[in-house]
Image (cartoon, rainbow, N blue to C red):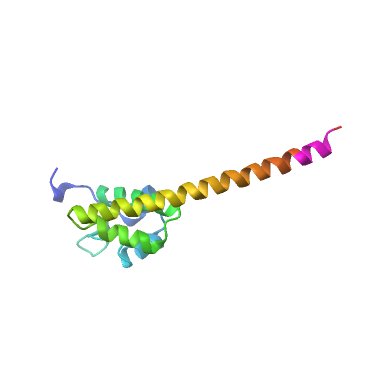
Amino acid sequence: MTAAATPRLTPAEAVERSGFSLDTLRYYERIGLLSGVGRSASGHRRFSEDDLQWLGVLRCLRDTGMPIADMRRYAELARADGPSAVRERLDLLERHQAAVQQRIAHLQSQQGHLAEKIDHYRTLLAP
């Protein structure tokens, strides 16, 4: 399929498929997280499957708590070529993964405290 024949999604379709709001898509485009979004002849945004795949990456980064500044840096590096850009992407993702693992460990600890409280109250209510 040629680039001209590649189906393009309307903003509403991109919202539905990505789970991001239209305002978020516009914001991501404005700050450089989303670049190269196509336009129709009338100037309306048209999103490609590649755009949606990239939005999936951004969704993962956002949902795991990556700060916007780091997301922007990752987006810059994703557009760059060469081993140094790949190395920096890897380093950034490894740091983020370590932070995610720390948050998971903290949440698991807190979940343990909640379980203890729940058990305590169940004991108080037991006949």
Residue 28 is inside the magenta segment: no
Q: Residue furthest bottom?
A: 30
Write the residue at 67% across / 44% down: 114
Write the residue at 56% across / 48% down: 106
Q: Quadrant of residue 43?
A: bottom left
Residue 59 at least partly seen: no
Question: Which quarter of the image is occupied by the N terminus?
Answer: top left
Give the side of residue 99 with respect to residue 122, left or right: left
Residue 44 at least partly seen: yes
Across the whole image, how many numbered discs are drawn on residues? 0
Q: Is residue 69 above or below residue 1?
A: below
**Foreground: 50 or 109?**
109
**Relative image position of residue 84 (x, y in whole percent):** 21, 56
**Relative image position of residue 100 (x, y in whole percent):** 46, 49
Q: Is residue 25 above or below residue 126?
A: below
Q: Residue furthest top?
A: 127
Give the side of residue 53 with respect to residue 122, left or right: left
Write the residue at 87% across / 32% down: 127
**Relative image position of residue 87 (x, y in whole percent):** 25, 52
Dominant SS of magenta comes to: helix
Write the residue at 31% across / 61% down: 73
Q: Is residue 57 above or below residue 121?
A: below
Q: Quadrant of residue 70?
A: bottom left
Stretch in magenta = 120-126
**Foreground: 106 or 55?**
106
**Relative image position of residue 26 (x, y in whole percent):** 35, 64
Q: Residue furthest right?
A: 127
